[in-house]
Image (cartoon, rainbow, N blue to C red):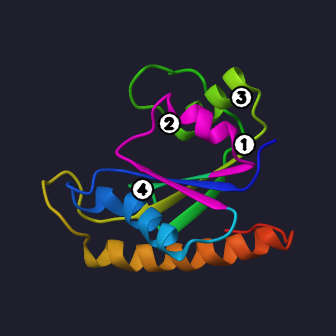
Amino acid sequence: MAAGTLLIGYGNPGRGDDGLGPALARRIAARELPGVTVEIDYQLTVEHALLIASAATVVFADAALDADQPFYFRAIEEAGGQSLGSHSVSPPDALALARLLFGARTRGFVLGLRGACFGEMAEGLSPTALRSLAAAESFFLGWHEAEGQGLPISG
């Protein structure tokens, strides 16, 4: 039976703010929260489906070009499946694959973190990204606590 929350932080830390997902995942991993498993990768792939199927809830954390606030937290209402392949897949596609292959009933969410500097080969995060990272970390901790108490989710 699936249990707990899986946080997958993905992106390329060598490309500036694209490293926001892994940065958040490292911060959450360091806290060793009960019931939270953390995975860090450069991109989502079909291989993540088994990990996703083992969790009750999955949160996909990534840098977001479309965030008008420091972060957004959105439920994945409908699983994807239109573009499954051997390389990078989207969060809805990864969730759909977990459902298709393993019968997973995993709930899925996307945590998109606003960044400002993308594409250039650069280590480190911009000031905008650092503010987004702090806000998203605070939100995730509160959300995790509320989840443990069975409180409604808001983002």
Q: Nearer the viewer, residue 152 or 99?
A: 99
Q: Which residue is mark 3?
A: 99
Q: Earlier in the sequence, mark 2 or mark 3?
A: 2
Label 1 vs label 3: CA separation? 13 Å
The amino acid on which the numbered mark 1 sits, given as a three-letter code, is: Glu
- Which of discs 3 and 4 lies nearer the camera? The answer is 3
SS at circle 4? strand
Q: Earlier in the sequence, mark 4 or mark 1?
A: 4
Q: Earlier in the sequence, mark 1 or mark 3?
A: 1
Label 2 vs label 3: CA separation? 14 Å
Q: Which residues are magenta?
A: 36-58
| Residue 64, disc | 4
Q: Horizontal and vertical percent for residue 69?
A: 49, 71
The amino acid on which the numbered mark 4 sits, given as a three-letter code, is: Ala
Callouts 2 and 3 close, C-beta under 8 Å: no
Q: Within 10 angstroms of label 2, few (less than 14), some, or many (20 or more) residues?
A: some
Q: Nearer the viewer, residue 101 or 77?
A: 101
Indicate yes or no whether the magenta region holds residue 34. no
Callouts 3 and 4 close, C-beta under 8 Å: no
The N terminus lies in quadrant: top right
Q: Is residue 56 above or below residue 101?
A: below
Residue located at (67% from left, 45% from top) = 76
- Which of discs 1 and 2 lies nearer the camera? The answer is 2
Label 2 vs label 4: CA separation? 13 Å
Q: Which residue is mark 1?
A: 77
